[in-house]
Image (spheres, rainbow, N blue to C red):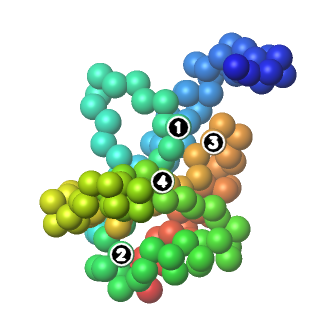
Amino acid sequence: RITDIQAALGDSQLRRIEKITKKRNKVAEFYKKEFKNLNGVKIPYTSKNVYHAYHLFTILIDFKKFKLSRNTFMMELAAKGIGSQVLYIPVFYQPYFQKKYKYKFKNFPNSISYYEKALSIPIFYDIKKSELKFISKNIKKLLTL
């Protein structure tokens, strides 16, 4: 159940969904161009027949290649005012599931690899071109030291 205020906000956003999604796609295309030739960084792939909403923009960074820890990288970005997030922690890392199912990490190499490299960077409707340039410039700078 949601409140009347939440419903009104959701309604107003749904009326603008196409405009919001188009803008997020433009932001995603900017990031893809910025990072596509950066060795050690993978950008999201989207099939040509898919219209993506880009709720998140998650890049995969081979932090070992760059001799950086993800935490250090995130702190460096934060020091510059750039937010980043790690989302979708594998369920087998959670203490409850560890205890209940006795998962062995060796059975999930792809999940672990993804988790160790994944980093979501800012993507939102009102982001400015100058902010996108600032974000991409600083990410590339940290990865080319």
Residue found 68% across the figure and 13% down from its top: 15
Q: Identify residue for label 3.
A: 124
Q: Quadrant of residue 3?
A: top right
Q: Amino acid at mark 2?
A: Phe
Secondary structure of the residue carrying numbered label 4: loop
In the depicted view, which residue is nearer to us: 5 or 45? 5
Residue 63: mark = 2
Q: Are marks 1 and 4 in contact (CB under 8 Å)?
A: no
Quick one: label 3 or label 4, which is nearer the N terminus?
4
Q: Amino acid at mark 3?
A: Phe
Q: Identify residue for label 1.
A: 55
Local packing at callout 4 (Cα closer than 10 Å; few below 14, some 14-19, many 20+) is few
Quick one: label 1 or label 2, which is nearer the N terminus?
1
Q: Quadrant of residue 47?
A: top left
Local packing at callout 1 (Cα closer than 10 Å; few below 14, some 14-19, many 20+) is few
Residue found 71% across the figure and 40% down from its top: 126
Quick one: label 1 or label 4, which is nearer the N terminus?
1
Give the spatial CA distance, label 3 vs label 4.
Answer: 16 Å
Q: Position of residue 123 (x, y in %)?
A: 58, 46
Residue that extends furthest to the right in the rendered view of this protein: 5
Give the spatial CA distance, label 1 vs label 4.
Answer: 12 Å
Secondary structure of the residue carrying numbered label 2: loop
Secondary structure of the residue carrying numbered label 1: loop
Residue found 70% across the figure and 19% down from its top: 1
User: In the rendered image of this protein, does residue 28 appear above or below residue 21?
Assistant: below
Q: Amino acid at mark 4?
A: Leu
Give the spatial CA distance, label 2 vs label 3.
Answer: 25 Å
User: In the rendered image of this protein, does residue 122 appear above or below residue 79?
Assistant: above
Q: Are marks 3 and 1 in contact (CB under 8 Å)?
A: no
Give the spatial CA distance, label 3 vs label 1.
Answer: 8 Å
In the depicted view, which residue is nearer to us: 6 or 135? 6
